[in-house]
Amino acid sequence: MAQAALSALRLYGVAAVESGQTSSLAEGTTLTHYRALAGIVEPSPYSTVNLDDGETAKYLHVLEQAYSHAAILPAPPGTVFKSESTLVRWLELHYFTLTEALSVIEGHAAARVSITAVRKGGGEAEKSLAALAAESLRLLRGQAAATVTLPSDDGEEDGDVVARASFLIDAQRWDAFNDTVSKEADRQTALTFRVTGPWPPYDFVRMQFGG
């Protein structure tokens, strides 16, 4: 039974690779191929993964290491396939959707922008700050291939979070995007802007495993 359980594979993400590539994209993982796609996997019991801090850190480390070598679509944390053949069938079934998604994100990176208030406010002042933040997000959206609005992060330390968003940025325009954020920070003196990244496109991928 234990041997059968360990024939399952934990999927970290799907990458665009050459069909003959055998070298791993991340330490401790291997590649399961279907045509020009490969699942980034490791052996796993066929059971629910306990996503504690250690497992979450491992998930992020694997994807960020793989992302430095290839375009990748992150899988939901803790995704496990019963067998290699099951994963290959899934890659075959969704091949065109996955390759199309990879073509969109290839050469791009995600930038997460948090906008916080320099001074706390309420009522009309809060509405005014939200309007200023929305104006800045609209400007930044014009430089991105895609944008996702994110929920407020309780862990922010620089004041009240007014708005958060993730932007899919052409890697060649990364510096220009950061320059635009800096100019917005100079212009919007009531707000503080924080950019993190470049990240893999975590916020822009929603894999489906039903059916």
Image (cartoon, rainbow, N blue to C red):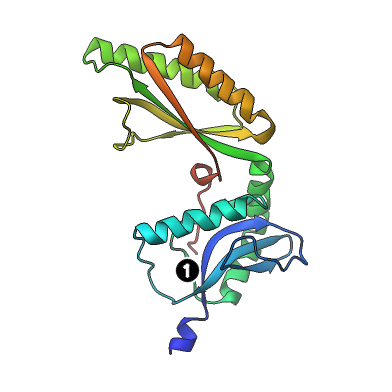
- Residue 130: quadrant of the picture: top left
Q: Which residue is mark 1?
A: 80
| Three-letter residue code for mark 1 | Val
The single residue placed furthest to the bottom in the displayed view is: 1
* Vertical position of residue 192 compared to residue 43: above or below: above
Q: Is residue 131 left or right of residue 148?
A: left
> In this rendering, does residue 22 appear at all?
yes
Label 1 sits on a secondary structure element that is: strand
Relative to the observer, which residue lies in front, 148 or 53? 53
User: Which residue appears at 53% of the width and 38% of the height?
Assistant: 197
Task: Tell me where residue 81 appears, x and y as whole percent.
Answer: 50, 71
- Residue 131: quadrant of the picture: top left
User: Which residue appears at 52% of the width and 19% of the height?
Assistant: 182
Q: Quadrant of the N terminus?
A: bottom left
User: Which residue appears at 61% of the width and 64% of the height?
Assistant: 39
Relative to the observer, which residue lies in front, 32 or 211? 32
The crowd level at tag 1 (other Cα within 10 Å; few <14, some 14-19, many 20+) is many
Task: Tell me where residue 31 appears, x and y as whole percent.
Answer: 64, 67
Task: Tell me where residue 200 appears, x and y as whole percent.
Answer: 56, 46
Q: Is residue 104 left or right of residue 189?
A: right
* Vertical position of residue 109 compared to residue 27: above or below: above
User: Which residue appears at 68% of the width and 54% of the height?
Assistant: 96
How many numbered badges does the structure rendering display?
1
Relative to the observer, which residue lies in front, 84 or 58? 58
The single residue placed furthest to the left in the displayed view is: 122
Task: Tell me where residue 210 appears, x and y as whole percent.
Answer: 48, 62
> In this rendering, does residue 74 appear at all?
no
